[in-house]
Image: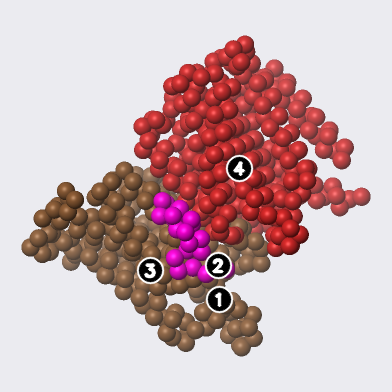
Amino acid sequence: MNYKKIGYGLLLLALLAAPFAGAYPVFVMKLMCFALFASAFNLLLGYTGLLSFGHAAFLGGAAYVAGHAIKVWQLTPEVGLLLGTLGAAALGWVFGVLAIRRQGIYFAMITLALAQMVFFICLQAPLTGGEDGLQGVPRGKLFGLLDLRDDLTMYYVTLAIVVAAFLLIVRIIHSPFGQVLKAIKENEPRSISLGYDTNRFKLLAFVLSAALAGLAGSLKTLVLGFATLSDVHWTASGQVILMTLVGGLGTLSGPLLGSALVVLLENKIGEMGAWLARLSGIEWFSSLGESVTLVTGLIFVLCVLAFRRGIMGEIIARLERKP
Amino acid sequence: MEIFGVSLPAMLSQLLLGLVNGSFYAILSLGLAVIFGLLNVINFAHGALFMLGAVLTWMAMNYLGISYWWMLVLAPVTVGLFGIVIERTLLRWIYKLDHLYGLLLTLGLTLLIEGVLRSIYGVSGLGYDTPELLEGATNLGFMMLPNYRVWVVVASITVCLLTWFVIEKTRLGAYLRAGTENPRLVEAFGINVPLMVTLTYGFGVALAAFAGVLAAPVMQVTPLMGQNLIIVVFAVVVIGGMGSILGSILTGLGLGIVEGFTKVFYPEASSTVVFVIMVIVLLTRPAGLFGKEK
C-alpha cells in the first residue's frame, strides 16, 4: 500500500515543481488533460468492462461547446468548463441509452458509429468552423479573480482541476456504486440475479465517464485556445484506448502513465527516429516522424498479444506476488 | 420529368451511385459477418484490406503493367493469403480472450497497414483509369448509364449471391454454419475446424480486396480510403445484424440506395443518414433488422 502513496506523492510534487524545473507548462497541461481523458475512459473500460469506441465525441464535443461558450457567448472560463462538461454528459446519456441496448462487440461498434456521426456534424455545422476549427478562444479570468492568461496561473488551476477530477474517479471506484460496476464487469448475469438493475448502473457509469472526458476536452480548449476536428476524429478514440491499454486496464495509475507515454511518443517520435537513424545507420528511421500511425499500430498489436496487463498492471502484479 | 423538383435522370444517376456504394457495403458487411460467425472477431482491418486491394491494383498497373482484369483475381488472392498469414500468426492467440481484444488487435493491424502505405504514398489520391472495355456510358434514351458503375453493381451482387449459395446450399457451407453454431461438436465429427477458421478469414478478407479492386476506378485510391468506409459498414452491420447472409446483402444495398436518395434531396445529411437510421433501428428493433443476439 505504501508504495502507492509514495508514488502518488512524488508525482504530485513533481507536477507542482515542474514549471520551475524547466518543463514547458503548456505541454505539461496538455499531458494532464490527456491523463484525465484516459482516466475517465478507464472508469468505463477498466472498471465496468464497456469498450466505448466513441470517447472522441465527448472530448471534442465538449471542446467545441466550451470554446463556443467562452469565445462567442463571452462567458467566463468556469462557466465554459461547466457547460462543456454538461454537454458531454448529455451526449454521453444519448450514446449510453442507445449503445446499452446491445451487448458485447456491438456496443463498441455503435459508439464508434455515433461518434462518427458527431464528427460529420462538427465538420459541417457552421458553429464549429469546419476544417479550421475554433481558433483564438480567450482564457479570461477564473471567477473574475485569477488571470489565466498567465501560463503559471493556468498551470496550477489545471493541476487543481485534474487532481480533483482524479480523486473523484478514485472515490467513484471505491464507493459501493463502483463495487457494483466491478461486479457487472466480472459477471453481469450474476449481478442481475442479485437484484441490480445493471443497465442503469452501466448508463450512469457511461455518463460519468463522458462528463469527465468532456471536462478534459473543455480544459484542453481553455489551455490551448482552440478546438479542432482532430479531437472529434475516431483516431482520438483509438488513442485513448491505446493509452489505457499501454498503462494498464483497470488500474488507477495506468492511464496516467499510458497517456504520458503516448503523448510523448507522438511529440518526440521524430527526434527518436533521427536518433535511431544515427545509431543504426539505417536511413529509413529518420522518416519515422511521419509514421506515427505505424508505430502506434505496432504498439497496439504487441500490447494485445503479449502485454495485456499494461505497464502498471505488470508492476502491480509483481508487487503483489512477492510477499 | 421531375419528381419533387429533381429531374428523373439526375435522380436515377444518384440512385446508381448509391447502389455502387451499397455494393461495397454489402460485400464488406458480408465478409465481416462470415468472419465474426466463426472467429468471434470483429475485423476492424476489413477497411484497410479493402484499401490494400485497391492499392495493389494501382501498384500492379503502374509498376508491372498488369491489367485490371487480372487484378480482379490476383488482388483478392494476394490479400487472402496475407489474411491467412495474419490469422495463423496473430489472431490465433486471442480467440479465447474477450471480444474486445480481437477488435483492438485488428485496429492495430489497420494502423500498421495504413501507416506503412502512408509512409510510401502519402495521403493524396492515386488516380486509376477505368478499364477500356467499360469506359463510356450507354444511352438509355432518358438517361446516360455509366458502364463501369453498372459493372460494379452487377459484379458485386453476383459475388454476394455466390457466397450466399456456397454458405447456405453446399456441404462446405453446412460445415461452416455448423462451426458457427458449435465448433467443438463439429471438430468431434472429424472436421478440421482450425483450418476452416483460417480459410474463412482468408476468404472474408479476399472479398474485401475484391471490393477494393472494383472501387479503384470510382474512388480516389489513397491509403486512408478504407477508414471512413469501415465505420459506415459497422453501422450497416448494427442495422442488419450479423445473423443472416442475405440480410447483410440486402441491408448493404438498401442503405446505399437510401444514401443516394439523401444526396439528391438533402445533400448535407448524406454522410450521416446511415447513422441516423442506425439510431432509429436501435430504438425500435434493438437486435437489428435480421439479427439474433449472440
Q: Which residue type does callout 4 highlight?
A: Val
Residue corresponding to mark 3: B249
Q: Residue B180, which numbered label?
A: 1
A133 shown above or below A147 = below
Q: Callout 3: residue from which chain?
A: B
Closer to the chain start, of discs 1 and 2, is 1
Chain letter for the part of the structure drawn in red: A
Q: Which residues are magenta?
A: B275-294
- Looking at the image, how many numbered discs can be counted on the residues? 4
Residue corresponding to mark 4: A207
Q: Colour of chain B?
A: brown
Q: Which residue type does callout 3 highlight?
A: Ile
Q: CA distance from mark 3 to mark 1?
A: 19 Å
For this view, does B10 lie left or right of residue B178? left
User: What kind of element bears circle 2?
Assistant: loop
Residue at horizontal 38 percent and vertical 64 percent from the top: B251
Residue sitting nearer the eye, A182 or B186 = A182
Residue under disc 3 on the same chain as residue under disc 1: yes
Assess whether residue B277 is covered by the magenta stretch. yes
Residue corresponding to mark 2: B293
Dot 1, crowdedness within 10 Å: few (<14), some or many (≥20)? some
